[in-house]
Amino acid sequence: MNEVNKTLYIPLYGKSFVSRQGIILHDAKAEEIWEKEGFSLKGRSASKWLAYNMAMRARVFDDWTDHMLEKDPDAIVIHIGCGLDSRCLRVKQQYKNWIDCDFPDVLAVRRMYYEETDCYHMMELDATDTERIKDLPDGDSAVIVLEGISMYLTNSQLRDLFSALKQKYIRINVLMDVYTVHGAEASEKKNPINDVGVTKTYGVDDIDGLLAGTGVKKISERSFTPAYLIEELRPIEKGFFKILFTGKTYGKFYRLYELAS
């Protein structure tokens, strides 16, 4: 795997670590895969605080996906940059068609742990190849999961991706986390992804400007670390976690947007 693809092991470790504690995110598949595929993480990548943050982010995406499927059971779920994530198993709502997308070398590992079914499929997809978007399943509406991928795409590439998705589907709902420009600059100097060799990331400061002309609009900005999930931490940990991963300071580096057409 290249350096960007190796970043998938950081959230995998976090979800496995937290799941073993029985809080925030119950993810038996992450535990299984980490036990077999995991390696010794160093520095910030192995931080329990980052693990809590990664698990909360995943849980927020899970809950949002469940909500979208409850509103629109016929929607196609498309997880771009799925890595080894088990959201397809964690969501509570039934789905009719779920597509997990990533690079071929990532899917080669993924296929060792996941089996395709009538309603679950895997597809090789480079998010920068907008022509490939046309090969996604047809349908009127799609729920698009973009977790931990936007920071590896330029603003122009993100804009092209949204335009292509809007051309493919009449209605799309998207949840996407982004670095701010300041966050991207900081990440090149001090970020867990550096521990697996990534040194270049991109940020978004003007989400409305980025989306202009794509047919997609910002609906809201959401929290990665809602209070109901922080409450699952031990009392002695809650205060320090809030300092690290909540408030205006955190928002200067990292944001979560809900988008729709």
Image (tube, rainbow, N blue to C red):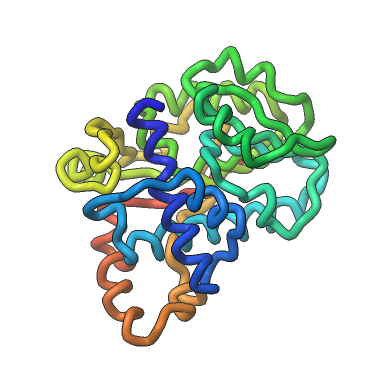
Query: Does 245 appear above or below 260?
Result: below
Q: Is residue 223 visible?
A: no
Question: Considering depth in this image, is 174 or 228 the residue closer to the camera?
Answer: 228
Which x, y percent locates residue 94?
80, 52
Residue drawn at 36 percent across, 26 percent down: 2
Query: Does 122 appear above or below 51?
Result: above
Q: Is residue 50 visible?
A: yes
Left or right of 96, for residue 53: left
Residue drawn at 48 percent across, 50 percent down: 34
Which x, y percent locates residue 205?
31, 41
Q: Quadrant of the N terminus?
A: top left
Q: How many marks?
A: 0
Query: Does 163 appear above or below 37?
Result: above
Question: Considering depth in this image, is 201 or 176 the residue closer to the camera?
Answer: 201
Left or right of 136, for residue 101: left
Quarter of image, res 91: bottom right
Which x, y percent locates residue 261?
62, 37
